[in-house]
Image: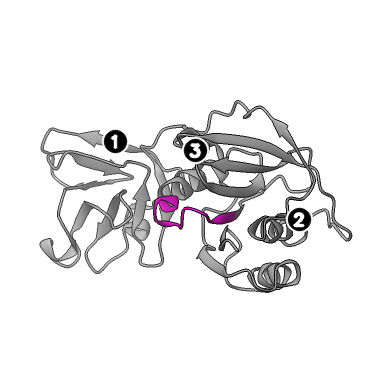
Amino acid sequence: MRPLVLFTDFGFEGPYVGQLKLAAHRWGPRVPVFDLMHDAPAFAPIAAGWLLAALVERLPEDAVVCAVIDPGVGTARRPVIVEADKRLFVGPDNGLLSRVSEQSAKTRWWSLDWIPDGLSASFHGRDLFTPAAARLAQGDWPAHSRITPPHCDASGTPAQIIYADGFGNAWTGLRRLEPAAQVEAGPMTFHHASTFGDREPGEPLWYMNSNGFVELAINQGSAVDKAGLRIGTPITLNLTPRENR
C-alpha cells in the first residue's frame, strides 16, 4: 500500500477537499491519505509546478501524488499519470507535472484513459484524479496508454513570486542566491538575513526558507501587502547597494 498525497489549489473552505478524501476512501479504504497543500497558486499550474517539484523532495519515495491545479478542467487537456523516479503523479497535462518530470532521473508518462461512471465536467479532482490515485496506491492501474512526455515550457523564470503564505511572506522560484544580492520586488528592496529576528520589526528581508526557496518577508509584517506582491510578480536581482524605496 502506497501513501496518497494531495496537492491542490482548492483551499479548505467549502466541500472540495473533503470530497477528495471521501473519493479516496471509496476507491481505497485502507490507503493512507495526506494533505501536502491546498493553497497552491490558484489557476497557475506553472508556478504550482515549481512548488511541487521542491516539496516532492520530502515525500516518501513510493508516494502517489494527486496534483490538481486545473483551470482547463473539462477541456481537451489530457489527464495523465507520470512516474518520476519511484513516485507516481496523477493530474492534468497543463505544465503542472513538467517540472517534476524534468528534474527526475527517470520518468515515464501515460495518458489516463479511464472514464469512471459519474465523471463530471468540472470536478475531475474528485471524480477522476483522486480515484485513479487511490487505485494506483493499491497497485491497481486504471486504463492507460504510454505517451511521449509533452513539450511544455514549464521552466519559465524562477525570478518571480510563486507562492504567498498566510503570514504575507512571498516565495520566489529561486533555489539559491548569494547573500550579497539584493532583491527588488514591487517598490521595495529586500536585503539578505538568516532569519526574521536579524531585522527589526517592520524591516524587509530575504532569506532561504525551510523548503529551499528564496523568500521575501517583512519581520512581523506582510511583504505581500506592503510591496503589492502577487503570483507572477517579477523580481530583480541587484548587487549594487541601494536604499529601500
Q: Report how far apart the C-alphas of labels 1 and 2 lie in the structure.
A: 40 Å
Q: Which comes sooner in the sequence, label 1 or label 2?
A: 2
Q: In the image, which disc is placed on residue 121?
A: none
Instruction: Identify the residue under disc 2.
Output: 128
Residue plotted at (63% across, 69% down): 31
1 or 2: mark nearer the eye: 2
Instruction: Identify the residue under disc 3.
Output: 99
1 or 3: mark nearer the eye: 3
Whether the residues at callouts 3 and 2 have beta carbons within 8 Å, the answer is no
Q: Report how far apart the C-alphas of labels 1 and 3 lie in the structure.
A: 22 Å
Instruction: Give the vertical position of 74 relative to 106 (above or below).
Output: below
Q: In the image, which disc is placed on residue 236?
A: 1
Residue plotted at (41% across, 33% down): 157
Amino acid identity at mark 2: Leu
Q: Is residue 201 visible?
A: yes
In percent of width and height, residue 41 lies at 52, 53
In this orientation, which residue lies closer to the viewer: 81 or 188?
81
Secondary structure under the numbered disc 2 in the rendered image? helix
Residue plotted at (58% across, 48% down): 88
Amino acid identity at mark 3: Arg
Q: Which comes sooner in the sequence, label 1 or label 3?
A: 3
In this orientation, which residue lies closer to the viewer: 94 or 127?
127
Q: Residues within 10 Å of mark 3 (few under 14, many from 20)?
A: many
Residue 26's quadrant in the figure?
Answer: bottom right
Q: Report the number of discs.
A: 3
Secondary structure under the numbered disc 3 in the rendered image? helix
Q: Residues within 10 Å of mark 1 (few under 14, many from 20)?
A: few
- The residue segment tinted magenta is 55-65
Q: Is residue 96 visible?
A: no
